[in-house]
Image: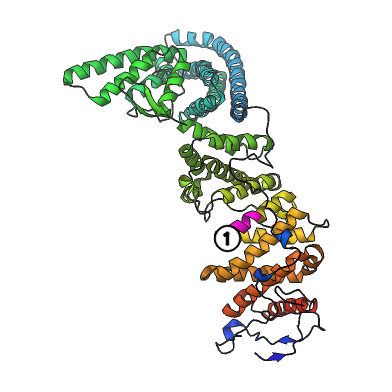
Amino acid sequence: MESATRTPASPHNDTSAPPGPSLDIKPLALRTSSQTPKTSPLSPLYQPAGNYNSEDEAFIEGDEIKTWRSGEQFQHPLPQTDDNPWMTCNGIVEKFDKDMCDVWKDEIQNLLIFAGLFSAVVTAFTIESYHLLEENSVTAYSERINILWFVSLSLSLATVSIGIVCMQWLREFQRDASLPPKDSVALRQMRYEGLLKWRVPGILSVLPLLLQGGLVIFLAGLLDLLWHLNHKVAIAVTVVVAGPMLFLAVTTVLPALQIIITQDRQLRIAQCPYKSPQSWAFYRVAIYSARFALYIDQYVRGHHHQRIATKRGVLRCFSQVRDWLQYDMYWWQLREAFSVNAAGEPCLTTDSHDIIRGLVWIAEASVHSIPWISAVQACFRDLDSLPAVKALRLLFRTKGDLVVSSGLRVVRDPATHQDIVAAHVLSYFREQNHQLHEFLLPHRTELYVRIRNSSVGSYNMKDGVTCPVSTFRDVKQLPKDVHIQFLYCFSSLLAEKDVKQDDMDAAWYIFVIVLRDPQLPDLETRRALVKFLGSLERWVNETEGPARLRAVEGLVDHILAFHRSRAYAFIRERVPECLPLFASVLGSLDDAVVQYGFPESFSRMPDVDYWWGLAMEMRANDTPVPGDTQ
């Protein structure tokens, strides 16, 4: 190629630089194969770094540091409390339940007081008004006011009755089972889901409406009496009273009927929370009656049926419980089991449906509480493999399939599996609360490095754990040892051809930030930089196909930004041992640029001029060429 004198257009370029080979700077769309340079404008300057042999060779070949791997002690753990993480999570739900139930209990207590006073007032009026129904000729208005006042009194008393029953339900919901913290979380989740499924909050919200409705009706009767001075009254009051009575009857029988009627032997349904003394009495009678009915059914059929036998075994166990607490415990054990034998005993238990849903609920409730985050992610790590996958699928909901499809199920190493689960959980917290980013960043980056070091080639990172470092600001928030470990990790990924673009971006950001650090890099940092550049050069040379083209595009972008920021001088001043490697990376990259042409996003005139400017600066500064003899 002929040489020609070229003055770079960039203001950063040195116009006094010695002449260099000409370069066709037309956009790619306008180039033809005959116009594409066949040699690199930088290739005469740089040779592969493999020939480098200097007094720093011992430095470059020094011992490498021990890289972080899953299963080892964390260097940057999240702050933890002294308690067991499950105890912390159990405390979270206990506080939530206590606050929730205290509000309901206070409201019911106030309603009971008001209903008692109101009933006394209405009773005083009805004592006088019912005499109007004893007269020989009963007027229409006397019927109306008695209907209104007796209905009002009935509604007030119904509010009291239903309120007392609701207080009994809440007492059973909050009853302490004195279980280990992990089991307490699961038991509470079972009760909580039943509370919601069976509309207990909705029933509680109706109580004030009943009492207010009674007040309105009483006032209407009072107005009617003031405007005017009884077989129909009984019918009206009976209809009104029938509603609360029917409610009491239905809620009394439902817990027992649910056990008897359901076809799910493991009871993975929302538990009916209508537990009260009267429902317990009916429950005892109903269970024994159902057992007897099944015995008769089997006798009539004349043969042993497995489903009926299992149902009889379950009912037998339910008939042996002494109170609602033991009822909950047996129900929960059935939900945990993979199967139930003919005696009604649960078989092969594992982390249950309830502990999974309970932990997800706690995570969703903890996104704005930093002290709880560490305990929540520790509990997720403690789950068995399959329940952990189910919990992540439920936590991420819309993209839960991506988490599972990323290969989490095929990770065999338990420590690596735990790190991946924790990384996903912390990623969820980061997505839900961006203010947690800086707080979580060091630990998330350490997790990422451990996972990448421990699972090269065995875990699909495409849709899996993402690199948490995405900007220069992120790099500045990280400790020095994280910088070093990330560069070593990235170098290993380059050797395994297992690099993502966000890995490349993060490693380059670290490279630039380390060079710009006011303090001179220590020995370990300089070795990490040398390893990074050496691995990068080999990767560019050895990678083929579309992967190499994508690498060239990304690296050209970083090199141009590097030149614009005048960061090249920092290499000469701070890490001169990196100059040959950096020059070799540029030479390999420039050969690729000539081979592929400038990437379309960098084919504009200023970008090509910047590329030329970097070449001129390197030539003007007499960058040492590996293998040259002076």
* Residue 458 % position (x, y): 49, 51
Q: Is residue 247 visible?
A: no
Chief SS of the magenta region: helix
- Viewer-nearest residue: 208 or 462: 462
- Viewer-nearest residue: 144 or 446: 446
Left-right relation of 145 to 526: left
41 shown above or below 425? below
Q: Which amino acid type corresponds to the residue marked 1 in the rendered image?
A: Ala
- Viewer-nearest residue: 55 or 385: 55
Q: Which residues are magenta?
A: 488-493
Label 1 CA crowd tier, 10 Å (few <14, some 14–19, many 20+): some
Tell me the SS state at disc 1. Answer: helix
400 shown above or below 387? below
Quadrant for residue 311, please give it: top left
Q: Which color scheme is applied?
A: rainbow
Quarter of the rendering occupied by the C terminus: bottom right
Q: Is residue 432 magenta?
A: no
Tell me the residue at 45%/16% (across/down): 326
* Residue 129 % position (x, y): 51, 11
Tell me the residue at 69%/36% (across/down): 79
Q: Is residue 542 visible?
A: yes
* Residue 314 % position (x, y): 34, 20
- Viewer-nearest residue: 189 or 89: 89
* Residue 610 % position (x, y): 72, 77
Quadrant for residue 265, please give it: top left
326 shown above or below 367? above
Pointer 1 residue: 495
610 shown above or below 208? below
Left-right relation of 478 to 344: right
